[in-house]
Amino acid sequence: MQLTPLDWLWIALYFAMNAAVGFYYRARAGKSVDEFFLSGRNVPWWLAGTSMVATTFAADTPLAVTGMVARGGIAGNWLWWSFVAGGMLTVFFYARLWRRSGVMTDIEFTEIRYSGKPAAFLRGFRALYLGIPINCIVLGWVNLAMVKILTLALGVTRVEALAIVLGLIAVTSLISTLSGLWGVLVTDVLQFVIKMTMVIVLAVVAVDAVGGMAALKSKLPGASLNFFPERASLFMPMMTFFVYISLNWWASWYPGAEPGGGGYVAQRMFSAKDEKNSLLATLWFNIANFALRPWPWILVALVSLVVFPNLQDPESGYVRVMIAYLPPYLRGMMLAAFAAAYMSTIATQLNWGASYVVNDFYRRFVRKSATDRHYVWISRWTTILLTIVSAVVTFYLGSISGAWKMLLATGAGTGSVLLLRWYWWRINAWSEISAMIAAAIVSIALQTVWHMDTDKPLDFAWIMILTVSITTAVWLAVTLLTRPESKETLVSFYRRVRPGRAGWKPVSAMAPDVTGAGATWSDALDWICGCALIYGALFGVGKILLGEIGLGLALLAMGTAAGAVIWFDLSRRGWESVSQ
């Protein structure tokens, strides 16, 4: 792909802008660990929420969506559309609780909910396990996407592309280590605007290149335009679809879609000004993530099926469409958009991973009483370490969506513990430990001993069903056979988080002065309406783009009505009661 001087100017301006933000926030980030990782807990909802969605909008996402559409049509996106219910659950049942906890990371939460050596072990193990290998797998597949993009767009070899990626990582690492979370948040907003603008431009150009929407539809098999899989679909049999919509959203741990919130989503909730901003940030994130972003990617993916059929690597179809149809003066801006998508995710993953390693392992177990300046210095070196390890991981990954499924299967069955630990006093540290161990053993055994393959739809479904069933039975048995947490720990947690009396009756009796309704039927109504809001907007926009105007408007009206119910309910209850 040939780049003009104007293209190079766009790219140069993009990097200059990011560097300026990094240096601007350098002094502020260096004040304390709280500033470096949580922006002083003073972030408004729109900034925190936009940063969440910018992080999930990585360079790998358009490529992965293109691969799903190539294999299963529009319905192939249910692999991630199924997480809407879990996202809305986080908004209305968990966002306020996370903000009340007052912790720096979701792993630090372990030692306010549990106590003793099991809690300390769980915190240290999860810090290293999630902060280094799991985080580096995520970084690796994002790197892999950027390697694919550069290989095709610039005509370079895989090694040369990885060298360029290492340069991008170096720049991103510099910004992240200099500016902490403030720099990440601000650049995320700028990068999100660039990314969304350019993917919309590419979608318009691509559809126009094949003769418009009517011509595109006429050249595609009808099944590829269905929003739900057909009964005889090979890519997504009904059993697999059932697993997606009934198990995925609550049973599996997955980065960015953890049941009840976690990872960088929790980090943004901790950084919000208050509980109101935490809830609104998470609500905005889910709306933007599921309802606003998908269609520009899907349209380009559909175009790729027409102009580049039967690709050996269908994920590359997105980049091939860009190369074939984007005007020269826009190619540099599109590459800058890919760089923005890449860097926003990398910056967050580096900052979030470093927070685990430093706050939950190094400061907790290695050096407990050093100065904030020392911990900030260690955080910056940890960021560099994660950068190097993630580059190595990139060599061993072949498929982006395959890596997604691998993590889903490995974390299957742990979600129920992560959800119930807030609302059931009987959960203890051994519940989480046994769930993690059981999920890993069962999932690995099914894939190695019984040779089930997560890339095969039916195998994936059975891996999920068996892993969730066995893991749930194991952690429930362990919970009931081991002692509950100490009264002091449970009362302290109950006073701090105020989860409500249901599920905490023995503990609430020891703290009768604690008020707070916890989860209510109004929250359940808001959750249902939140799902209707997102699916109404998602499918409504899709139907309108595909020419079914009447049905599209009806779906949008449904989504709008659901959103109005949510706003009315929260206003009726008053933000004081919502945030109590």
Image: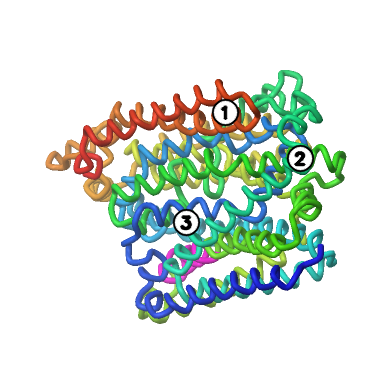
Q: Which residue is mark 2?
A: 303
- Residue furthest to the top in view is 231
- Is residue 121 depicted above or below 468 in this figure? below
Which amino acid is tagged 2?
Val
429 or 43, nearer to the observer: 43
* Residue 283, above or below 360: above
Task: Decide if residue 45 is on the left or right side of residue 547.
Answer: left
* Residue drawn at point x = 72 percent, y = 45 percent: 402
Q: Amino acid at mark 1?
A: Ile
**Magenta part of the protein: which range?**
350-364
Secondary structure at badge 1 equals helix
Q: Which residue is mark 3?
A: 51
Circles 1 and 2 in contact, beta carbons < 8 Å:
no
- Could you tell me which quadrant the N terminus lies in? bottom right
The residue depicted at 59 percent of the width and 58 percent of the height is 135
The answer to which of 32 and 554 lies nearer the viewer is: 554
Quadrant where the image shows the C terminus: top left
Distance CA(mark 3)–CA(mark 2): 29 Å
Tell me which label, 3 or 2, sits earlier in the chain. 3
Instruction: Report which residue position mark 1 lands on.
Output: 245
Q: Looking at numbered disc 3 in the image, what kind of residue is underneath it?
A: Ser
